[in-house]
Amino acid sequence: MAPSLARLSLAAALAATATSSVVNTPFPAGYPSPWGSGGAEGWEDAYAKAKDFVNQLTLVEKVNLTTGTGWEADVCVGMTGSVPRLGFRGFCLQDGPLGIRYSDRDLMRRRGQAMGEEFRGKGIDVQLGPVAGPLGRVPQGGRNWEGFSPDPYLTGVAMAETIQGIQSRGVIACAKHYILNEQEHYRGNVNVKIDDRTMHELYLWPFADAVRAGVGSVMCSYNKVNGEFACENEWSNNYLLKNELNFQGFVMSDWGAQKTTLSSALGGLDMAMPGDGAGPPYGSFWGGALTEAVLGGQVPEWRLDDMVIRIMAAYFKVHTGNYTYRPDINFSAWTKQATGPLHPLSNSTFTVVNEFVNVQADHGDLIREIGAKSIVLLKNENHALPLNKPKSMAVIGEDAQDIPGGPNACAERGCVKGTLAMGYGSGTAEFPYLISPATALQLQASADKTAFNNTSSNWDLGAARAAASKASVAIVFAMATSGENFIIIDGNAGDRNNLTLWNGGDDLIKAVASVNPNTIVVLHTVGPVIIDYAQEHPNITAIIWAGLPGQESGNALVDVLYGKVNPQGRSPFTWGKSVADYGAQLMFKAPNPAVPEQTFDEGIFIDYRYFDKAAVEPTYWFGFGLSYTSFDYVDLKIAVSNASSSSAASGLTAPAPTYGTVNKSAAANLLPAGFQKIRPYVYPWLNDSSATAATGTGPNISSFPAAARNGSAQPVLPAGGGAGGNPGLYDVLYMISATIKNTGEVAGTEIPQLYVQLGGEENPFGVLRGFDEIVLAPGEVKTVTFELTRRDVSNWNSTSGNWEISTKEKFVFVGSSAALIRLNSTLPAPAGMTWQGQ
Ligand code: BGC
């Protein structure tokens, strides 16, 4: 193995540098919500179809598509109103995003496709995932596991692949939670203060990839961003997402994250979920209240039309090719019985709500493949793994066991029983079955004639030691979970209180290792845990991080333990030796809980970027993972491409369009005579004809600058102009290649990683900018090529409001983790530039 560069000494030299301070984000107050135009790649046809549709709608029909019918008002976790006159059913929105730790783009895509097929098969229009927020600022963040990694580049790739997979199957994906929802404590009202550069280079980055991948919807989060709630935030929604990133789809609120009628409409929200939750007169911030606001002129007609065109364009974007037909909704989110109410909240219209359509096809095989290929082998001494018919085996720990009462015994996985295969909260799915590690290992043991002992208690350390001391191999299991704040387990309110293993897992591991010199540790955890003691322990011969493997847990684990699959997963985060090692900290207790506030003043230095800067050596670095074989890296080559220079976007948009002609008399927008309301369903009609002067709930229109309602042509931002930003950002400036050889005895897959040092004290030692999966037979040699785009080598300049390649000298590193650098070189300056020192 080639020596790593002296990262830590360089990092130490950089450690004294200033952190970024929060600066005012430069954008004009009252920035109007940009109108969708279809002017981004992949949206033209969808907008043409959406225009034909929206042109025909009445005012209340338009409003009906923007507003949820209420919590538990219909069978899906969120459902909008419909357009019965045109036979158009309301939108069915359903959780969730389940995903974690990948090394392989193809698997990300196939996973997205499989999820899309399952959601479509149930009649769901919008899958509420994938997740890029939380990104993972702090390792205890309760919902980190719903997303991918604290590295924005990796999360961006995973978002794009997942979205394209889901949407290729006729289902709209939803990139959530936008943005800075980095912890569960105080998520409902914390004001997160952030500077422009950190926003662009870290948290917005993967959302840019989502938009570029054509995502149909984005869910705004519960928290505030620089003083305004995310669902009514002119900066994050209007300025960044809809103008700079040129997002053409719709923004929906997280459930209950909408706070007002006008601020949300003018602040870029397009769909209110679940739609209810406001007081009288409408029980909704929108519905009839939005109709009022449009008729009263507080919300311009173009803004309502823009909400609807965005929603319908997303619909038509995914309903193409073989997917124009829309399956009926055949499930209920609220009951497991076949029959039940169509409208649970009003307990009405009893019918068959669950047809139990089996949508799983052969996805179990894919889940097993993903489960095995994403296992990360952290330690493997004395060839402890793979196992080869051991004489005797002790399986120890509750985390290896079947879940008493069945895999779904705890609602939304909100308890700790048996093996851990997903976190808890709305991001969960129901298991059709769950193969526990003990079950799968027992099967393998009996095939191999291995004497097998299974000891389940975490607390009976005497029994654990007794079992372990008699076995030729002891496999000890431990877990740590987290989730969403509406469930509290053992005092953990969503976020983890610490980074230790749960249920006495650390003591169990130590007890087993104290008596068995061939102890293998298997971890099912939502993120990093403190395991430096296990890394150092001479009796612990192997450590496996199996993450949250899902229903094929045991089978996937056996595949790796026995070498049927050579491990290839790489850790998507850094494993510190203490919480303090991570720098940025979770805010458990706000100094003033009435107005909780957090400043992300660590800037872009989270996870491995921080460890490096602070010269803190972790247990395992981001990107680390072993194989049963070994690889050599040689021959780094850099080709500078001829991409022309990119110019700042400029020009003006067209003025805001409206679609069709609507009757704006109060009478035309009243509840039709004879219509029987289902209460407390949300409707778009006015309560009475005198109601058009009100402003709904929230601030009066006089508190908004006139610019907020300005539908005249608007300047395109310099960094804008295409889906995901200026198209020039995605020009390939460099092709970087390296040659990888399998120097071991067995076939294996290496995941070479490309890091770039952008130069200067304000940049980390390296940031991930490429990775690939290289499958190699013993002795085989292959070349991997990475493409570096303009965005990849740029920094955000908040003064010019644009990405810029600085004149600081830059370096590239190819390695097998953020610290194991195998090859390195300076990066030649792009045509027309010269580097001017570091
Ligand atoms: C969560 C979202 C979820 C929604 C609907 C919210 O509490 O934050 O992620 O999609 O509920 O279940």
Image (tube, helix red, strand yellow):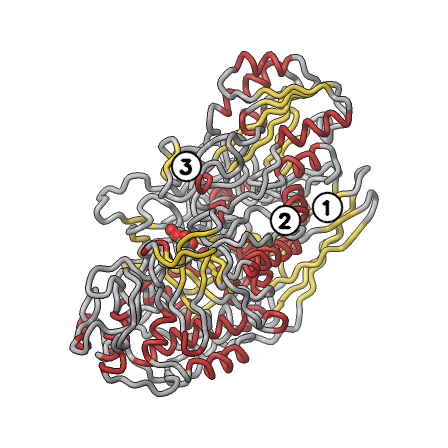
The quadrant where residue 255 appears: bottom left
Residue 356 in the image: x percent, y percent? 55, 52
The quadrant where residue 292 appears: bottom left
Which of the two discs, 1 and 2, labels the residue nearer the N terminus? 2
Residue 633 in the image: x percent, y percent? 73, 47
Count neighbours of disc 3 (C-alpha within 10 A) and say few if under 14, some if 14 to 19, many if 20 or more: many
The quadrant where residue 347 appears: bottom left
Task: Check disc 1 and report its element: helix, strand or loop.
Answer: strand
Relative placement, left or right, of 817 versus 670 is right
Q: How far apart are the alpha carbons under marks 3 and 1?
A: 33 Å
Residue 92 in the image: x percent, y percent? 45, 62
Residue 749 tag number = 1
Which of the two discs, 3 and 1, labels the residue nearer the N terminus? 3
Query: Can residue 807 be seen from the camera position used here?
Result: no
Instruction: Locate the N terminus and report the quarter of the image it occupies.
Output: top right
Count neighbours of disc 2 (C-alpha within 10 A) and say few if under 14, some if 14 to 19, many if 20 or more: many
Q: Which residue is mark 3?
A: 496
Q: How far apart are the alpha carbons under marks 3 and 2?
A: 25 Å
Residue 27 in the image: x percent, y percent? 33, 69
Query: Can residue 768 be seen from the camera position used here?
Result: yes
Circles 1 and 2 in contact, beta carbons < 8 Å: yes
Circles 3 and 2 in contact, beta carbons < 8 Å: no
Q: Which residue is mark 2?
A: 103
Count neighbours of disc 1 (C-alpha within 10 A) and say few if under 14, some if 14 to 19, many if 20 or more: many
Circles 3 and 1 in contact, beta carbons < 8 Å: no
Mark 1 residue type? Thr
Q: Is 760 above or below relative to 535?
A: below
Task: Check disc 3 and report its element: helix, strand or loop.
Answer: loop
Mark 3 residue type? Arg
